[in-house]
Amino acid sequence: MFNKILLPLDGSDMAESVIPYGEALARRLGSELVLIHACDESHNLNHTMHRLYLEKRAELVAEGFLSSAGEGQSPCVTAVTQFGELAPVIHDYVEQNGIDLVIMVSGGLNASAARPNSVADDVFRVIGCPSMLVPPRAVAPGKPLFSQILVPLDGTPGSEQALAPAAALAAASDAVITLFSMVKELVHSEPESDLVGDRGLYDIKGSLAAQEKTGEYLETLAWKMRDQGLDVDTRVDVGSDGAKLISAAARVLAADMVVMATTSRVSTWGVKSVTHKLLLAGDLPLLIVRQE
């Protein structure tokens, strides 16, 4: 599924910290790994230096593949240096070269202190292929990359488009997948004399029934994936804030990756976007799939 993986680099340690994610996927899936650097006008005079840096980085990655050939396949590694702003360069390269996945650090790639996620946001909005966005604090030496994968679902066919890439990751890394869904708290409106306030009374019976129904839906999907030889669990929590519940579930499950589908693309992320909240507040890599 991920035959060609693109890693945008700018020469910083932060941007390079996602290389292990690309290496792990490329080695396990036999994918081609492409390292790309965009030289804007301020760096045009240093183009040769940037090209040599990227070629050397690609050479080191390729040498790493050869030295660990016993752990998997030894994929092709390519270095590409182009002129222009990062987001348009990546968009054009993805469209023209059949890239299947872009992996980048959110908060890296020359982002400013005032807009730490601006560059990652710009790239995310313009490309159509799946994107893996890695918060800086998620990158740590020796930390597992793909062992526990959390897949949030909202019951719609669109959200289920995250299942195929999650299955591909799990199959390549023997990871456990947990299908997760949220049931909103059910409350009954009460008369003005109600002492519990405007919120009303919590409907325990209704919430349990909703949890059971949602759990049955997740189990139906889980059994289809288990038939493929995957290790799949399910989890349903009750609450009102999807981003908070996903983050809490990820901590409880010790997840190291969240895979989810989103409708956001060119338009600006809304303040209620669960994906954006997870990116800003979370410490887990997000593999984001575009809903068709």
Image: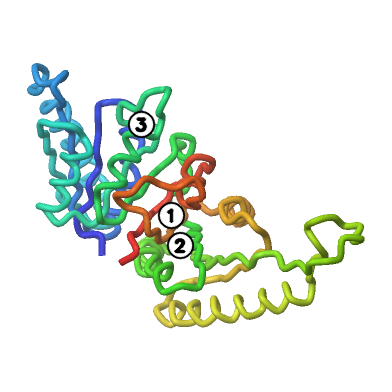
Looking at the rendered structure, the secondary structure element under dot 2 is loop
**Which of label 3 and label 2 is nearer to you?**
3
Residue 262 spot, x, y in % from top left = 40, 58
Which residue type does callout 1 highlight? Phe
Looking at the rendered structure, the secondary structure element under dot 3 is loop
The answer to which of 276 and 51 lies nearer the viewer is 276
Which residue type does callout 3 highlight? Gly
Name the side, left or right, on which 54 lies relative to 232.
left
Relative vertical location of residue 229 with respect to residue 49 in this rendering, above or below: below
Give the labeled residue for mark 2.
175
Relative vertical location of residue 39 with respect to residue 193 in this rendering, above or below: above
Image-quadrant location for residue 86:
top left
Give the labeled residue for mark 3.
108
Residue 40 spot, x, y in % from top left = 16, 26
Q: Quadrant of the N terminus?
A: bottom left
Which of marks 3 and 1 precedes in the sequence? 3
Which of marks 2 and 3 precedes in the sequence? 3
Which residue type does callout 2 highlight? Ala
Image-quadrant location for residue 201:
bottom right
Give the labeled residue for mark 1.
146
Callouts 1 and 2 close, C-beta under 8 Å: yes
